[in-house]
Amino acid sequence: VADTGVGIPAAELPHIFERFHRIRDVRSRTHEGTGIGEERFRRYFELGLIGMAITSPTKGLIEVNDEICNILGYERSELLRMTWADLTHPDDLDADVAQFNRIVAGEIDGYAIDKRWIRKDGQVIDATISVKCLRRADGSVDYFVALLQDITEQKRAEEALQRAHEELEQRVIERTERLSAANATLIKEIVKRKRTEEELLALKDQLASELTAMTRLHEFSTQLLASTELQPLLDEILEATIAMLNADFGNVQLYNPQTQTLEIVTQRGFQQEFLDYFNRVHEGTASCGTALLRRERVFVEEVETDPSFASHLHIVAGAGYRAVQSTPLFSRSGEPLGMISTHFRQRHRPSECELRLTDLYARLAAEMIERKQSEEALRGKQQELQDFIENASIGMHWIGLDGTILWANQWELDLLGYEREEYVSHNIREFHADSQVVEEMLARLARGETLNNFEARICCRDGSIRYVVVNSNVFWKDGEFVNTRCFTRDITEHKRAEAELSRSEAYLAEGQRISRTGSWAVKFPSEEVFWSQEVFRIYGLDPATTRLSLEMAFGLIHPEDRPVVKETFERALREKTDYNVEHRAILADGTVKHLHVLGHSVLSKSGRITEYVGTVVDITERKQGEVLLRNAHERLEMILDSITDMFFAVDKEWRYTRFNKQAEEQLKVLGKDPASLLGKVLWDEFPNPPPEQALRRAMSERVSITYEHFYEPLGEWVENRIYPGPDGGLGMFVRYVTERKRAEEALQKLQTELAHVTRVATMGELTASIAHEINQPLGAIVTNGQSCLRLLARESPDINKSREVVERMISDGLRASDVVTRIRALLRRKDAEKALLNLNEVIQEVIALTSTELSKDEIHLQTAFAADLPAVLGDRVQLQQVILNLILNGKDAMSGVEWQPRELLITTLGSMPGEVLVAVRDSGTGIDPQDCERIFDQFFTTKSEGLGLGLSISRTIIESHGGRLWATPNEDKGATIQFTLPAG
Amino acid sequence: MKKEDQIVFVIDDDPSMRQAIKTLIETVGLKGETFASGQEFLQSALPDVPSCLVLDVRLPGLGGLHIQRELSERGIQIPVIFVTGHGDIPMSVQAMKAGAVEFLTKPFRDQDLLDAIELALERDQASRRQQVVG
């Protein structure tokens, strides 16, 4: 929408004109009308939005508004007097007039035109004028309404725009021109680049092939580092070189410094003939020899014409190559190592690049060879060193700070007998026998000390101990303890020898001391004298201060003995013989010693005396002992002769060796000559003597035996006391004991008598009970007899029942008879008669007699008999008397006990070896501990009746059986009286 | 009352004597039951039939007079006939005072024992009747 420049859109203009027309119509129709339409128009007219003018075709301008005045710079009044033509720029007037004429002509009703105006002040402005005509009914123009819009600003803006556009266009053109220039340069550049790229591509191919070679080279280097084998690497290098040079054959030679030749180690494509021919190539021969000589690569483009091949052409022809290159391999120090040669079937010259790569390959090969050679050399050295370390006859090991064994050599393992895994990585402490020693070693090493010949004891695998000396110090690195360096030397044998030596020396010294034997030596002709410690001791001299010489030695001899000794010695020296002499010596303190000297001559091969060696024995004590012994012997003889017993001695062969005076007299009585009996065998002189068994037992068992017997020829009781003698024989004291025997027998008789009396008395006490004991079966017999009669008296007598009853009667009768028998046995007066007895049975018989007596007092008797009681040798009646006494004693002890169970327990025990024990335990009033022994006194009794002999006689009986009888109070109540008897 | 329904209890520690008395009792058709000790008798259940007790005076453990006293203390009214190996007067008096039917010395005449047993059983029957009536 074009702007009219006065705020009214251009499109609005026709509408305004339209409205203007209508107003005009209305005004004309109503003319004087209401005046409202007029008013509204006037307001538009004077609104000043746009310049407006009404023109009459005849009268010119008739109406103008303020705006148009403003646009044109004229006063209203001035304008009303002017025409459009006055105001129009002369150049634009024609166009306007033409349009105007068309309206007038009725062709158009209006027009709009941009044209230049001349303001009152002379300024030319652009303004658009829109003209509309209002026609009369006849078509003639009544008025013109003109709307004038100042478009000077618009014009100006358009012009500015136009100018800007033109400027822009200008600039685009300029820029385009510049870009074209740049583009042209760029194109040139691209072309250049393209060319370079092509060159690069070409280079790239070359580089790629070099890269392949370099990669290969790199692989070799890697392999070189990893591989230990030279041969496969050389194979590969040759292969790669051949491939890289596009060669047909090739070989690698190694330089042998001994023969100064090149020797083929790997090859490709050659026949055996060639290989044999060029087996060893000397300097100057063929290309490789030439390269070796010149110390640089040789390239032969055509072998046929090359002088170095002149004499080898037949072989070369056979091999089939025409060109060859040989690149020498040198060590870093420039020593020849070998050669890489490649051969071509056709004439050939490799490129610079190829040769450069060949050099690299050669360099690598040289490195490898050099390295392998040095490695081999090193390995050889290492093996030697390893062998030296492992098998050096010294143990070596390393230990960490904590004592762990990090390494040990084979010799050490062999020494101790361990497998490596049993030793290495274990702690050294495990192997030391003395923990203090190892701790000290480790502590000192940790302090940085060096151990020199440190003695230790190590435990071997087989459990033995080895003595070692250790030399060790520590390997420190940056102040850190890395490991020890321990050297272990086995000194076990040395130690053992040392110990043995010192032991044997000690033994010798000890032996000399104990035997009082010193050893000595005199060397000839130097007369140098040597004494052992014991000789100094014998003479009471200090080895440190004594100067030994022959003269000094002779000076020690008792003056009375000296001449004899000297003479003996000198004679022996003369005759080169041994000698043997006893003499006295006087010590510094005046003591006289008896010495026994032995000398042994030591002769040289030529028969000269080189030495006398011998012994000195102190025989002083022996000499004194001899005297003492003689005295003691004499005293003994005297004693033996003065005793009243006869003494006989026999040796172990039963030969008489001694009789004393009494024995001699007895022998004479028997008609024997004592002197002639000496040395004769006892059994020959007295066959079957009564004590034969005792004698033989004493001899064989080396025990003392006393044996008594009645010796018929003399009518005497004899006591033989037999002793084993120190010489393996026997000594026997014999005396007559008839008197003693008689006294003993009388006593025995008396005791038997007493025992009998007391027994009878005891039985008297039991009369009532014993009567009951008999009465009981008698009562049963009577009752049974009566019953039997009744059974038989029946109309049909019950025979079976009767028989049963009668059988019982018989059994009761026997029972009564047994009681009587036992009583009679106890009451019988008879001498002791010993037999093997089972004490359990013996006790049981007594119990049978006393059960009534005990039940009368309501005493409960229990027994605890040992099942396997050993038999005892004894008199049944006497032992039964003892048991009876003990039972009645127990009964009596409980008679005063009221309202308590009365219990009597008889126990037999065979647990003690060789002994049987019987204990009778009551629950009575007990014994005062003070009375424990007194109760065995004769006539001791606590009872109103009774002799008080019961326990006394019991003890006598038991003791006569070799046993003991004693009483002890029980812990709770009552007492126990018990006896032991030797098992039979 | 049938004879075989009545029981004569015998207490004697001597097995021969026990057996002999039992045999004798059985010859007259009575039933005999024997015990070796008073404890054994006191522990056994007594049947509710007319019965009497032949009791040895001297027994190990519980003596005859003890047993008699024990029975009366327990309220067991059983007529007792004492037999003894060697009776003495004080003992027999004590027994009779305590209500014994008879006191016989071994060896005794069979008829004496049987008479005593008969008397004892009659007494027991009488006392049992009295108990029932009363």
Image (tube, coloured by chain):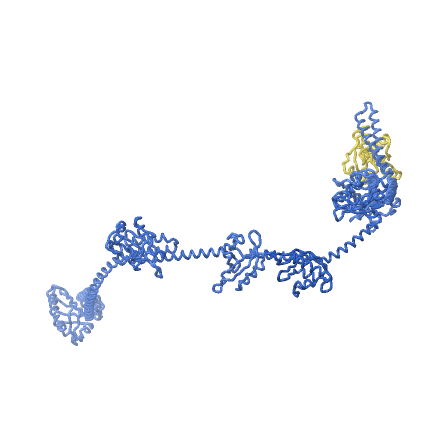
Chain colours: A blue, B yellow
Identity of the residue furthest to the bottom in this view: A121
Left/right placement of residue A534 relative to residue A904 reads left
> Where is A337 relative to A718, above or below?
below
* Of residues A970 and A401, the one drawn nearer to the viewer in this rendering: A401
Give residue A742's position: percent from left, percent from top.
87, 43
Left/right placement of residue B51 relative to residue A547 reads right
- Corner quadrant of residue A566: bottom right
The number of numbered discs placed on residues in the rendered structure image is 0
Identity of the residue furthest to the top in this view: A795
**Quadrant holding the C terminus of chain A:** top right
- Corner quadrant of residue A73: bottom left
Can the viewer see residue B66?
no
Can the viewer see residue A385?
yes
Give residue A145's position: percent from left, percent from top.
16, 68
* Of residues A487 and A795, the one drawn nearer to the viewer in this rendering: A487
* Of residues A3 and A548, the one drawn nearer to the viewer in this rendering: A548
Give residue A54's position: percent from left, percent from top.
16, 70
**Quadrant holding the N terminus of chain A:** bottom left
The structure residue drawn at horizontal position 28% and vertical position 56%, both measured from the top left corner, is A287
Left/right placement of residue A616 relative to residue B124 reads left
Left/right placement of residue A832 relative to residue A494 reads right
> Where is A782 relative to A33, above or below?
above
- Corner quadrant of residue B111: top right
Give residue A71's position: percent from left, percent from top.
19, 73
